[in-house]
Image: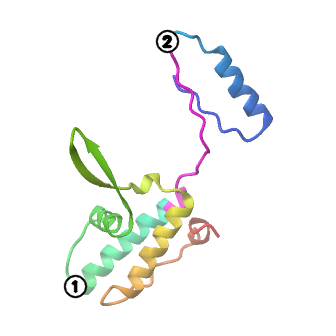
Amino acid sequence: MQDVYRVVDDRVRHNAMAAVQRLPLEPVHEVIIKPWRKKRSLAQNRLYWMWLRELRDHIEQATGQHYSDDDLHDYFREKFLDRRVVELGGDVVQVRKSTTRLTVAQFTEYLERIERYCLTELAEPLYLTRPDIYDEAMGR
């Protein structure tokens, strides 16, 4: 069993400390305290996949080329996200960051880069839809 506490007030802090005090010494437990970072929001996720479908349809209409939503997801991850080096047993590989690990602010920047790409990099520019959730997804 794993307990997670987001310390937002004294009550939660007290509950977290009480949970640690109740832990038996055997088996050994690990307690990790780190700043909480909100991951991308549901509005961002909905907007992202809507935009990928919209871009997929736009490319197909403009060029006749067919790409899946996942193809476009992989393309933008490769184009816009940083790599990190992972070494295992002397073997070194570069791994792209996952969009699911982006914070709200990082994902907002990622969405802005995709929107800019659609306006400036496509042979036939695409003005992506800005639905009701746009402002929420972009942190406005």
Query: The magenta stretch spans which residues?
Result: 28-44
**Residue 97 locus on image (x, y percent):** 38, 56
What is the total number of numbered labels drawn onto the structure image? 2
**Residue 21 locus on image (x, y percent):** 67, 17
Q: Nearer the viewer, residue 85 or 120?
A: 85
Horizontal side, residue 79 vs residue 31: left or right:
left
* Disc sitting over residue 107 in the figure: none
Q: Nearer the viewer, residue 29 or 75?
A: 29
Secondary element at image label 1: helix
Q: Is residue 43 magenta?
A: yes
**Residue 58 locus on image (x, y percent):** 32, 80
Residue drawn at x 30%, y 47% is 86
Q: Main secondary structure of the magenta part?
A: loop
Label 1 crowd (10 A; few <14 / some 14-19 / many >=20) = few
Q: Amino acid at mark 2?
A: Pro
Viewport quadrant of the C terminus: bottom right
* Disc sitting over residue 27 in the figure: 2
The reply to whether callout 1 and callout 2 are in contact (CB within 8 Å) is no
Is residue 70 positioned above or below 132 on the image?
above
Label 2 crowd (10 A; few <14 / some 14-19 / many >=20) = few
Q: Is residue 115 magenta?
A: no
Residue drawn at x 59%, y 32% is 4
Horizontal side, residue 18 vs residue 59: left or right:
right
User: Given the current orientation, which residue lies at the most extreme front position?
Assistant: 90
Secondary element at image label 2: loop
| Quarter of the figure with residue 51 | bottom left
Is residue 97 positioned above or below 6 on the image?
below
Disc 1: which residue: 63
Residue drawn at x 39%, y 54% is 98
Q: Nearer the viewer, mark 1 or mark 2?
A: 2
First of labels 1, 2 by sequence position: 2
